[in-house]
Amino acid sequence: MHDWSDEDCIKILQNCQKAIPKETGKLVIVEIVQQPIAHDIFDDIRLTYDLVMFSHFSGGRERTEREWKKLLNEGGFTRYNIIKIPALQSIIEVFP
């Protein structure tokens, strides 16, 4: 979703939310979650990816947890869980 604008991401999430069972459904997103303060060896690379998204896509960018939360809420999802893994990306579990 990093190459889509906020408005497009919200539309995508709204469509996903409609397709997921409310009681048992879950959406899994594998994306970079920018950290405001450097915490691991991947932070500089995450920043570089953000600059690439900015330069190549209209509205695309890497997002912080706060920005993900806003998108997810506007997309119709009430709960989420971010699982950090030893990689650039994190796993974002999203629940209706």
Image (cartoon, rainbow, N blue to C red):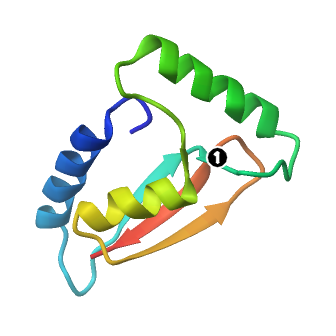
Identify which residue is drawn at 35% across, 56% down: 71
Quadrant of the rendering where the N terminus is positioned: top left
Question: What is the tally of numbered marks visible in this picture?
Answer: 1
Q: Secondary structure at mark 1?
A: strand
The location of residue 5, given as percent across then percent down, is 32, 34
Quadrant of the rendering where the C terminus is positioned: bottom left
62 left or right of 83? left
72 left or right of 22? right
Q: Quadrant of residue 44?
A: top right
Q: Front-most of 7 and 30?
A: 7
74 left or right of 30? left
Task: Tell me: residue 50, above or below residue 56.
Answer: below
Identify which residue is drawn at 50% across, 13% down: 55
Identify which residue is drawn at 45% across, 56% down: 68
92 left or right of 49? left
User: According to the image, label 1 marks what residue?
Assistant: 34
Q: Front-most of 69 and 24?
A: 69
The location of residue 2, given as percent across then percent down, is 44, 35
Amino acid type of the residue tagged 1 in the rendering: Gln
Q: Residue furthest bottom?
A: 23
Q: Front-most of 41 and 68?
A: 68
The location of residue 79, given as percent across then percent down, is 39, 78
Q: Quadrant of residue 56?
A: top left
Identify which residue is drawn at 13% across, 63% down: 19
Q: Residues within 10 Å of mark 1 (few under 14, many from 20)?
A: many
Task: Tell me: residue 1, above or below residue 55.
Answer: below
Q: Residue furthest top?
A: 56
